[in-house]
Image (tube, rainbow, N blue to C red):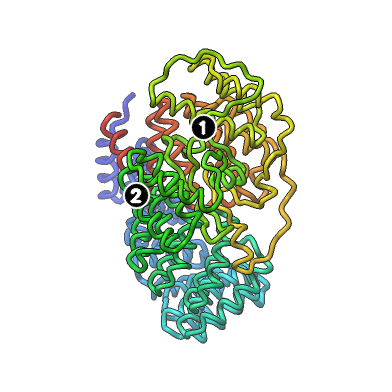
Amino acid sequence: MTFDKTKAMRNAEKYLSQGKLKSAISEYEQVVKFDSKDFGTINMLGDLYSKNSDPKSAIKCYKAVADHYGKQGFAQKAIAVYNKISRLEPNSIEIWQKLAELYKQKGSPNDARIHFQKVADHYERAGKKIEALSMWKEIALLDPTDTAAYVSLADSYFAEKQMDEAMEAYIEVGNRFAAKAAHDEAIGAFEKALSISKSEPRALSGYVGSQSALGRAKESAERLAEILAEFPHSREIRFLLIDCLIEAKEIAEAEKAVVKLVELEPANYPKFLELAHIYIDTDDTNSASRILSMSSEHMLVGGQADEFNALVTALLEKDPEHLEALRLRARYCSWQRDEEALCRSLAKLAQVARERESVDDERYALLQLTMLAPQKVQYADRLRDINKEHGFDAGEGESLFDQRFLKNGTAANHPLEYSAPGEAPLVSFDYTAESDTGFAFTSPVNEVAEVEGVEHLPTGDLRPDDEQRLQKEIDSIRFYIDSGYAELAEKAANELKGEFGERPAIAALFNELKSADAIEPVETVSESKAVAIGPNTFDLSEFRDELGLEDSTPPDDSDYETHFNTATAYQEMGLIEEAIKEFQEAASLVRPNDGTRRFFSCANLLGHCFMQQGMPNLALKWYERCLETSELSKEEKQAVWYELGVAFEADGDHERAGKYFEQVYAENVNFRDVSERMKTIAVNH
């Protein structure tokens, strides 16, 4: 039979008008049983139970109603119902605490304080000191200006050996004093927090802030340096130290600290930019150029090419003939694929280098110009004069770029080109701090050599541009032969033979390959202590002596370096399957939590390789493994989320792609093209 709620409600009202309380209760019980969400009736039923001397049933009804109002955010209604319960159960600790929290939610601190204090007093009488302290903490939080109450709370936690709570309380006390500009008192509170945990970032940050407000940045820096010696891998402490050194105008020391920071985690390179601005503002152009050289590749690869160009422009405005700044401008033009601007920057570099008698700079600028602008014979004429005057071999295939690029543990498909993962080849530059020149350009194309004992086979005519490309490829393969990459050289030579057929120069390459095993391998990354940042590197170790940094003993990771560097070489050549194999071998030799970024680098590059192969499902596995790396920075996480979004989008999973893009967007709306990608997904799906 269907229950008639309206009839039951009428019957209950009739019984109430007749004074038949029990009959009315019975009808309302049926209504509540039928409709458990009718909280108005439940509240009325509680009132009837109370009148009928059934407090237990009344309290049950009232609690259901009060909890409902509380969850809905109706604090005042919930308070009214809990007050009914309090009259029936006047010593209920649970109800006092509920009322205290609701009064706090409503914005009635005095009423909240009364009820929290009732609970605290009850716990103290019962000997429950820790529970009482938690209530006193709530009371202290009600009034941000009552610092004295929080001091007492912090001291009480400390006395009870509740060290975590005591440290939190002392930090809050310090922040309250600092907000009132009572910095000496704030420092005292932060000192107490640091006595519990000397590396606590929030306590250190508060301590440093108050010390700085009192003009004691140098004193803070000394304290931080001592703590950092105990916790050398703390990113937060090192950041605070750098900021203190900058504020104390100890810029040279700040630069040392930044170099160490970037050595530990390359993603922290933006700290270099702060120093670059300082050096430019103080007209220290040499230091500014040094900083920009160390961070240039990070900025270009990280999508900050415009900011990099702005800094280089500011540097050249200070000193239009600064050699290092001119090299950096050329690097920027190369990255932008702006051949016209690149020629202008190289011409300017060659001119200034000639005036400064910097032969290496002039010669390497001219080498590039003879390839980029062969119609301008003045460059070739000047290059011949330099070679003749200084005894350079005009046809030599080795260049400073080749030496240093290989020294950093990588090899390129073409000695004239560098390409980041997923990017088209560029004319390349490489920075090093080994000499005053410091900047290396690519070498010119070698003439095809006559090799004794090689039969001169028919060649057929080639167009001039094909002839030039063949010679470039031959030089590239010789580069691998000379560097000990016989396997790579043989593979490239076979491909060249397939494209150009039987030719004397190609036959000469195969002849040279026969003796390739006798070539002594060049120095690897582990031997030169270069810091690998990615496919393009800068050598931070070369700055250590100049900046007075101590050397540390590197781990024995030659097997890892061999696989990683070989993989990088394969990737640069476009031999992606071979690169994947070597990257996987390298990844198997390291762990995500070994304190380095080696596993992260392998996993990230494997993701790129599989994306290049059109296998986003496999790329996803490696991008996800990137996130296993311990202590990833915010920027690194954003980069991995972005790559996951790209991979999911390529795999057809637009919903999950959108979620990862949203994660990036939530933290950094300017990250690469994440805004556009989100719009595209929203429009199309």
> Which amino acid does the dot numbered 2 rest on?
Val
Does residue 267 lie above or below 120 as drawn? above
Eye-nearest disc, 1 or 2: 1
Q: Is mark 1 on a helix, strand or loop?
A: loop
Q: Residue at x 53, y 67 (%)?
A: 255
Look at label 1 and name its amino acid.
Glu
Residue assigned mark 1: 447
Residue at image mark 2: 669
Q: What element carries label 2?
A: loop
Q: Position of residue 527 (x, y in %)?
A: 70, 49
Left or right for 91, reference 673: right
252 up-or-down from 27: above or below: below
Residue 279: name its quadrant. Answer: bottom left
Residue beneath the point at 43% across and 59% down: 353
Res. 88 in view: no
- Locate the N terminus and report the quarter of the image it occupies: top left
Q: 47 and 516: which one is in front?
A: 516
Which one is nearer the viewer's eye here, 221 or 37? Answer: 221
Crowdedness of circle 1 by 10 Å Cα count: few (<14), some, many (20+)?
some
Which quadrant of the rendered structure holds the C terminus? top left
Horizontally, residue 394 falls left or right of residue 36, namely: right
Give how far across and how far down residue 612 sits, in percent: 47, 28
Quote the CA–CA distance across marks 1 and 2.
Answer: 51 Å
Residue 475 seen in this snapshot: yes
Task: Check whether the beta carbons of the residues at disc 1 and disc 2 lie within 8 A of each other.
Answer: no
Task: Give the class, few, some or many, for how many residues have Cα within 10 Å of label 2's Cα (few <14, many ≥20).
Answer: some
Residue 134, labelled with which disc? none
Horizontal placement of 338 versus 356: left or right? Answer: left
Camera-side residue of 617 and 169: 617
Could you tell me residue 662's position as x and y percent? 38, 42
Of label 1 and label 2, which has the lower sequence position?
A: 1
Identify the residue at image location x=50%, y=34%.
414
